[in-house]
Image (cartoon, helix red, strand yellow):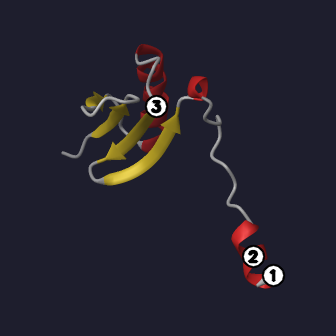
Amino acid sequence: MISYYCIVNMPGVPAREIRVLDARDDTSARKALDPVMAEWFGFSTLCLYHGERLIEVRSNPDLGFPLEPLMPSLMPEGLDVAA
């Protein structure tokens, strides 16, 4: 059986916490991350997996990370045109 789990990364700490989640699909696994975020209030990132498949990475907004993923930058394309 393949489990849903998350890896909790703390700033400046080389060890990681692995938490198995009680989830049956990707949607319920994403919802199960909310209590983990509340418990590990100083986390830098939470990485959600189903087996070896990465589903989502959440960053801590209290550390200055955005709540939503940033849109891809158009800057490199503009630099290619300018060169």
49 vs 77: above or below: above
Q: Bin the neighbour count of mark 3 within 10 Å (Cα to Cα): few under 14, some 14-19, many 20 and up.
A: some
Tell which of 67 and 64 is nearer to you: 64
Figure check: 7 above or below 73: above
Q: Position of residue 12 (x, y in %)?
A: 36, 30
Residue displayed at 76% across by 85% down: 83
Mark 2, Cα crowd under 10 Å, few <14 / some 14-19 / many 20+, is: few
User: Helix or strand or loop: what does disc 2 sit on?
Assistant: helix
* Mark 2, residue position: 79
Task: Give the foreground label among 1 and 3.
Answer: 1
The answer for how far apart the CA atoms under marks 2 and 1 are is 5 Å
Task: Mark 3 and mark 2 in contact? Answer it, CB < 8 Å.
Answer: no
Q: Position of residue 6 (x, y in %)?
A: 34, 35
Q: Amino acid at mark 3?
A: Ser
Q: Nearer the viewer, residue 24 or 19?
A: 19
- Rendered position, 58 above or below 72: above
For the residue marked with disc 1, what is the amino acid?
Ala
Between residue 48 and residue 23, name the one nearer to us: 48
Query: Is 14 positioned to the left or the right of 30 in the image?
Result: left
Above or below for 54 versus 20: below
Q: Earlier in the sequence, mark 1 or mark 3?
A: 3
Residue occupying image coordinates x 24% and y 31%: 15
Residue type for callout 2: Leu
Circles 2 and 1 in contact, beta carbons < 8 Å: yes
Task: State the residue at coordinates (62%, 30%).
Answer: 64
Q: Position of residue 24 (x, y in %)?
A: 36, 37
- Reading the image, the residue beneath label 1 is 82
* Residue located at (48% from left, 35% from top): 30
Query: Reading the chain from its start, which is encountered first: label 3 or label 2?
Result: 3
